[in-house]
Amino acid sequence: MIAAGALDESYDVAVVGAGPAGLAAAATCAQSGLRCGLFDEQQQPGGQIYRGITNSPFARGATLGDDYWRGEALVRAALDTGAHYASGATVWGLLRPNEIMVSIDGVTRQIRAGRIILATGAIERPFPIQGWTLPGVMTAGAAQILLKTSALAPRGRTVLAGCGPLLWLLAWQYLNAGVRLDAILDTTASANWKGALRHAAAFATSPYLAKGLRLMLAVHRAVPVFRGVVEIEAEGRDRVEAVSCRTRRGRVERLPADTLLLHQGVVPNVNLALSANVAHDWSDTQLCFVPRVDQNGATDVPHIAIAGDGAGISGAEAAEARGRLAGIAAVRAFTGKHLLADEERVAQRSLHKYQRGRSFLDLLYQPAADFRRPRGDVVVCRCEEITARQILDTVTLGCPGPFSSYSTPSWISNHTTLAMRCATAHAAPLLSILGCSRANRLPKKFSFERIAAQAT
C-alpha cells in the first residue's frame, strides 16, 4: 500500500477498483513493465466479491465457499508485481482527458495516466418497499460484507426476500456459519421462465448449473421458502418487527422478524463512466444502463476502458478475464507490439466459459415490475425522505428544453432535493424507471445524464 504523498504524478495506466477485474488488469500491466497505479476506496483489496480476503475472520473451509478463496491468489499476484496500490483512495472525477482526481486521507491529487481502466464493479439494485427504512432492514449485499469482514451475522428471527444468485449464496453462507433463517420470500416472477428457457441449453453446459443446484438444494432443505411473492411490507414502530407478504395465488403471510434482508440483483456501477461522457446503452436483459465497450473494454472516450461488472454483470470469473483483456490491450497500446497472445487466448476462453449461461440467469432473475417501480408513499431516498409519489408528480410537471415531454434524472434530482451523493448514485436506476413509467417512454430513450457528477 502507498500513501497519498508517495504517489507518482503520472502513470502509464491508472486502474480504478481493486476487485477481480482491477486486480487482473493491474497485474497484467505491471508484469509487462508498465508503471501502474491501482486505486480503491476500500482499505483492503478484493472488491465486493473478495471483500476481507486478506484478513478474513474465517479459516479456509466451507463457510464462505471455495469461490471466495480464489481471491487470495489474485490479490497476491497483483500486489507482488510492483503496481502502486493505494487503498482508501476515492477517485471522484475524470474531469480532463488522461487525468483522475483522487482523494486519500483528506488529500486530493491530480494523477495523469496514459490509459485509465475503470473496474468499479457493481452496486445493488434499489429495492424500496414499504418500511424498508426501518432499523433491522438492510440489503443482502451489506449483510454479506459484515459476514466476510467481521463474521457478523443477524441474531433472532431473520427473513431474506427478493431474487437473484446473491440472495441464495448469502443464505447458504449463513447456514454454513450456523445462522438460523426463518424464511426466504422468493420474488422471482413465474413469467420470467419463458424467456430464460430459451437459454437453457447454454446454461446446462455452464459452470453455474451444478454449483447452483447444490447450493439451492441445501438452502431448501433447511429454510422455508415462499415462492411467487408479489407484495412485501416491513412492519414495526421503532424497528422491524414483522414482514408481511402476498403471493400471486393470494396467500397472505405475516412473519415475525428482527432482521429483513432485501435483494433483487446488481447493476453496473457506472457513475465514473457517466461523468466521463462514456456512451451507455439500455440493456433489456439486465434492465439497466451499461457502458458501450468493445471486446477489450475500450469505450468511445479515447484512453478509457471499462472492465468487469462495471461493463455489464457477468460474475467474478468473467470480470477477472475482462480485466486481463483490458490490461493486455493497454500493454499493446504502449509497446506497439502484439504481446501476450497466449494470455489473451486463455482470458478469452475463460470469458466465454463464464459468460455461457448468463443470459439464463439474467432473464430468470429480472426483478418484477412492481418491485422496480415503487408507488405511493414508499420512500425512494431515505436521506431526503423523497417518496415515489413526489418523483412521479415532478415528472408530470415536465421539463423545458429538448426533453420537454419528459423529465431527465438530473432535473428530477434538482426539483426534489434528491441531490446528495447516496441518493443520486444509488437512486439513479429508480429515477430512470419511475420517470419512464409516468412519461410512457422506454428507459433507453430516457436521458441518463451525468448523475455521477452531482453525486461527487
Image (tube, helix red, strand yellow):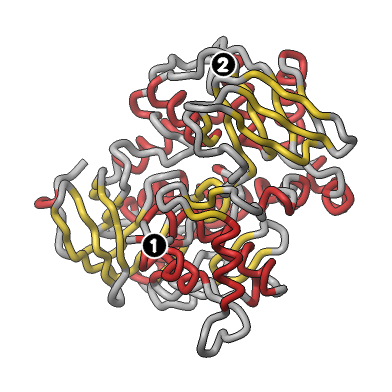
Q: Tell me the SS state at disc 2.
A: loop
Which amino acid lies under the numbered mark 2 shown in the image of this protein? Ala
- In whole angstroms, how far apart are the C-alphas of marks 2 and 1? 43 Å
Looking at numbered disc 1 in the image, what kind of residue is underneath it?
A: Ala
The residue drawn where x is 30% and y is 51% is: 38
**From what the image shows, is residue 414 above or below residue 165?**
below
Q: Can you tell which mark lies on residue 86?
A: none
In the image, residue 412 lies at what x, y percent? 49, 69
Q: Residues within 10 Å of mark 2 (few under 14, many from 20)?
A: few
**Image quadrant occupied by the N terminus:** top left
Residue most extreme to the left: 5
Q: Position of residue 187 (x, y in %)?
A: 74, 39
Q: Quadrant of residue 233?
A: top right
Q: Percent from the top left, x then y, of residue 48?
A: 46, 39
Quadrant of the frame with the C terminus: bottom left
Q: Which residue is mark 1?
A: 419
Where is 296 relative to 199, above or below? below
Q: Residue 401 versus residue 287: which sits nearer the camera?
A: 401
From the viewer's perspective, tell me whether residue 187 is left or right of residue 455.
right
Of circles 2 and 1, which is in front?
1
Q: Residue at x 59, y 50 (%)?
A: 377
Disc 2 designates what residue? 62
In the rendered structure, the answer to whether residue 22 lies left or right of residue 440 reads left
Q: Nearer the viewer, residue 277 or 233?
A: 233
Badge 1: residue crowd in 10 Å (few <14, some 14–19, many ≥20): many
